[in-house]
Image: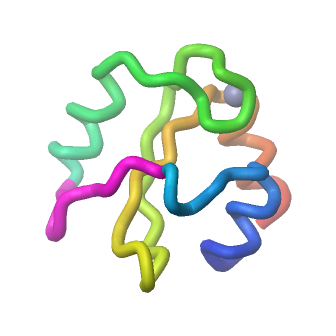
Amino acid sequence: MNADGMLRLLAAEPSLLPSAPDGADGKAIETRRRERHDCLRCGEPADTAAIVDLHEYGKCWLDLCYRDFIAVQNAN
Ligand SMILES: [Zn+2]
């Protein structure tokens, strides 16, 4: 799934997503995952973090709980 499709699925507003640093590696993602963020889709505590490249908005974090992460994966 491309980033646009993912955002549609999540009903996320791209301009509101937190921007991710360029060149974030697995360690940065792990750090993000350990921080306390809310799931983009349901507002529950997020268990997963991923980076999407939104081009005009740059790279952004996608913080999701497991349930919504799985939902996105399954829709992929
Ligand atoms: Zn969720």
Q: How is the image coloured?
A: rainbow
18 inside magenta stretch: yes
Residue located farthest toward the bottom when viewing the structure as drawn: 55
- Left or right, residue 65 beside residue 35: right
Image point 66% across, 41% down: which residue?
69
| Image quadrant where one finds the N terminus | bottom right
Question: In the image shown, does 8 or 64 lie closer to the viewer?
Answer: 8
30 inside magenta stretch: no
Return the x and y of residue 63 as percentages of the image width and height: 50, 38
Q: Quadrant of residue 22?
A: bottom left
Please provide the residue range marked out in magenta: 17-25
Q: Is residue 14 above or below residue 12?
A: below
Image point 64% across, 16% down: which residue?
44
- Left or right, residue 5 beside residue 55: right
Image point 68% across, 75% down: which residue?
4
| Image quadrant where one finds the C terminus | bottom right
Return the x and y of residue 40 as percentages of the image width and height: 62, 37
Q: Is residue 53 above or below residue 14?
A: below
- Secondary structure of the magenta portion, mostly? loop
Q: Is residue 49 above or below residue 9?
A: above
Q: Is residue 52 above or below residue 28?
A: below
Image quarter for ligand 1 equals: top right
Image point 48% across, 75% down: which residue?
54
Return the x and y of residue 37 as percentages of the image width and height: 43, 23
- Left or right, residue 38 beside residue 35: right
Residue located farthest toward the front when viewing the structure as drawn: 15
Question: In the image shown, does 66 or 3 lie closer to the viewer?
Answer: 3
Return the x and y of residue 68 as percentages of the image width and height: 73, 36
